[in-house]
Image: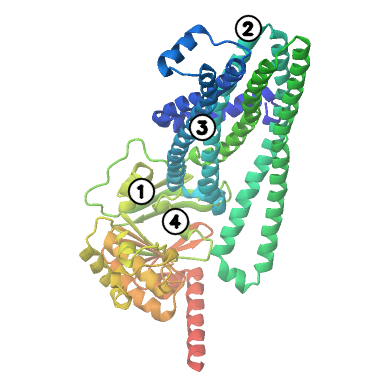
Amino acid sequence: MSPDQETDDEKDIRTWETVRPVLKKYLRPELPIAIPAVIAGAVAASAGFGLPMIINVAFPIVFGERELPPEIRDWIVRTFAPADMDAAKLWLAVALIPLVMIMRGVGIYLNSYLLACAGTHILRKLWGDVFSRVQQLSFSFFDRHRRGEIMTVIIQFTHNLQGQMVAVMNDLIIQPLTFLCAAAYLVYAALTSNESAMLLGNLLAAAMVVPLIRIVGKHMVKRMKKALTTSTEITSTVEESLSAQREVRAFNLEQRQSELLYKQLTRFNSLTIQMSAWGLSLAPAVEIVSSLALAYSLYRGCGDGLTMEQFAAIATAFYYCYDPLKRLSGLINQIQIMATMVEKINAVLEAEDETPEPEQPKPMPIPVRGDVDFDQVSFSYREGEPVLRNINIHVPAGQIVALVGPSGSGKTTFINLICRFYDVDSGSVCIDGIDVRDISRAERTANIGLVSQFSALFQDSIMENIRVGRPTATDDEVIAAGESARVTEFAMEKSGGYRFELGESGSGLSGGQRQRVSIARAFLKNAPILILDEATSALDMKSEALIQEALEKLAHGHTTFIIAHRFSTIRMAQRILVFEAGRIIADGTHAKLYEKCSLYRGLYDEQVRQAETDRKEGASA
């Protein structure tokens, strides 16, 4: 049965089944805080019984309509020895009201404070779990979800879910207990004054609210789901615009992006207003029902000889019944909204890891040699056309191999499979004879060094950005790696040297300097397998020459894979693999390939012509 064909009861059950595991996982550790919160809530809820009782019992005594019970009179005499018993009765009655409200106020404060503490702990754990899960998922997950969507789940949905949890926990403690205490007084009043018919009529009137709650909840959840989807679109648009400011300015896309965001904000605003309209309709509906019930009570009470203090007490008790009912009327809707958020969060927490850790990892040999084998490997993205087709290749340890070919021919996918960023569709990729799927993530990454075209730097010092390569390295080892990558010559020009703090995403360094920091990481890591993925493609010729020298030094003695469009970058390669349409169509040295492979010869000649054109233009300038 599809969700659209479910009955309301079935939807409620499914909603609860969705929320319950999350509540259990994140609320159970907070029981040491939640239990005192329940006790405080019970103290606050006792006013639902205490205040009507004071009105019904104490007030008639104060106003002389009823005598004090003998045991209470004797206690007053023994305890206070009052000169004026009437004054003593008045002070006692006056003191009871603030005493009850003080108890209620302190109980509400402690309940709310303790639940806020629990909510903060929940948020910390929820944020941590979602972020940790994102860090573990395969690259295919990021291919299917926009970065803004993932950010919305990590930051907004988890924060909103925490707020909803705290609100629900608060209502689930204080409001039902308050209702029960007030209802207990109504039962007591009915049993002592024969007003059971009036009581029954009012309690039955409360049931009139239930169908309304279900109708409102249905409409709210429908709009809530659309609002959450729109919210992720808004975040994605903002994130894309901020991360692509150069392109936005260069192509005059400011107006286009602003109009796109305005449309999304308008849709979100409309949905939010509709949710508010439905949600806010519950409180006045309950107020109307309660006023009708109270009017019915007054009508029946007058006919049955109800006294003023009895009616006032019952009216107060009804208030403490209907006020919780009014608050609880939105509880089902809150749980349904929580369920919607949980579904979004569970899409991350329960997402299938397509490159899971092996159950029994196989240890790599010591030392790791760095042999790499592809055996009948085929791979495709999202069940599309194969990007690699039946790749068979053996790369012995220590060999420097260049990968060349047109864009989209499969070069980057080839190295992604070595790193196990994705799993093969068929065949196997092995390092030192062990399938990468049988190697633990930690051991695999420890033995592969990667220098990419746009290496990520973090908002930290130059030294700590290099130390990413080996977190246990000493300062001297970090500086030695920096010297090998020619970082020292620009780091010493910065205030603080290697302690110079970079800005967001490593701002504060030029492109060439950023690449040298990335290369320094690889020097520090000293992994047996090295991957250079377009490591110099974004640099000018002068910067490329400086980095090329460092790369040649870095590649020596390591199994190295080089992807580069510039043939000058692959001059150190001992072997070249030529890719076309997902296949390796040629394998050999430069001289052999230039003679026998027309694709390679054409790519190389085009590079030479372009380099000569650039040289002439530079000379004329």
Q: Quadrant of residue 77?
A: top left
Q: Could you say whether the residue bearing mark 2 is in a helix, strand or loop? A: helix
Where residue 442 appears, as percent x and y from the top left, is 32, 47
At horizontal 41% and vertical 72% (from top left) the residue drawn is 508
Q: Specify few, some or many for label 1: CA neighbours under 10 Å numbering under 14, 14-19, or 20 or more.
A: many
| Residue at the spot 52% in from the left edge and 66% down from the top edge | 406
Please name the residue that numbered disc 1 is placed on. 430
Q: Secondary structure at mark 4?
A: helix
Instruction: Report how far apart the C-alphas of labels 2 and 4 lie in the structure.
Output: 85 Å
SS for callout 3: helix
Residue picked out by circle 2: 192
Q: Position of residue 547 (x, y in %)?
A: 35, 74
Image coords of residue 534 (percent x, y): 44, 67
* Residue 498 drawn above or below residue 473: below
Q: Is residue 87 above or below residue 168?
A: above
User: In the image, which disc is placed on residue 414?
Assistant: 4
The answer to whether the residue labelled 2 contacts the one labelled 1, judged by CB atoms less than 8 Å apart, is no
Q: Is the residue 175 above or below the residue 162 in the image? A: above
Name the residue nearer the viewer: 314 or 62: 62
Few, some or many C-alpha atoms within 10 Å of disc 3 (few <14, some 14-19, many ≥20)? some
- Mark 3, mark 4: which one is toward the viewer? 3
Of pointers 2 and 1, the one earlier in the residue sequence = 2
In the image, is 322 to the left or to the right of 45? right
Foreground residue among 180 and 125: 180
User: Disc 2 vs disc 3: Cβ atoms closer than 8 Å?
Assistant: no
